[in-house]
Image: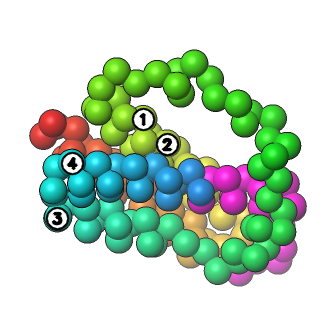
Amino acid sequence: MKSNTLSPELFRVIDANINRLKEGIRVVEDILRYKDNNKELSKKLKSLRHRAHIQETQKLLQYRDSINDVLRPSTKSEQTRSSLEDILTANFKRAEESARVLEELYKLENTQYSENFKTLRYELYNLEKEVLLNK
């Protein structure tokens, strides 16, 4: 690990994006698990969600400030979904984008974490294609 280059504000970015990544994966996982009874894809997504982890959880919690997040209120597009496919797409994109943010930020601090999030992102791209082309 490199010297401490991440500021409290960047730990907030990391915290938000780890949560967003795991939440996005969880939505897709639960739809495939409970609605589609797809054990294989659900297990893949569960495995990805568990790999979206870092050791510094206490540090993330220390700097969390979700109450004062300037973009906390939902936008219109976040409140509107017209189909299950829209929900799946939105949550795949949410997870992929968050993995990219984490990949980039961890280039400053921990290249192992960076590579892990890059791998997760590419696995999500493949699962997105597999899930949405079979809907």
| Residue 123 image point, x, y percent | 33, 58
| 4 vs 2, front mark | 4
Which residue position is annotated with label 4?
35
Q: Which mark is residue 94?
A: 2
**Separation of marks 4 and 3 at Cα, in angstroms:** 14 Å
**Separation of marks 3 and 2 at Cα, in angstroms:** 22 Å
Q: Amino acid at mark 2?
A: Arg
| Residue 122 image point, x, y percent | 37, 55
Measured along the vertical axis of the image, is residue 36 above or below residue 54? above
Helix, strand or loop status at disc 1 = helix
Quarter of the picture containing the N terminus is bottom right
**Separation of marks 4 and 1 at Cα, in angstroms:** 17 Å
Q: Main secondary structure of the magenta part?
A: helix
Q: Amino acid at mark 3?
A: Glu
Closer to the camera, 67 or 7? 67
Residue range of the region highlighted in magenta in the rendering = 1-18
User: Which quadrant of the structure image shows residue 102?
Assistant: bottom right
Which residue position is annotated with label 1?
90
**Separation of marks 1 and 2 at Cα, in angstroms:** 6 Å
* Residue 2 highlighted magenta (yes or no): yes
Q: Are marks 1 and 2 in contact (CB under 8 Å)?
A: yes
Q: Are marks 4 and 2 in contact (CB under 8 Å)?
A: no
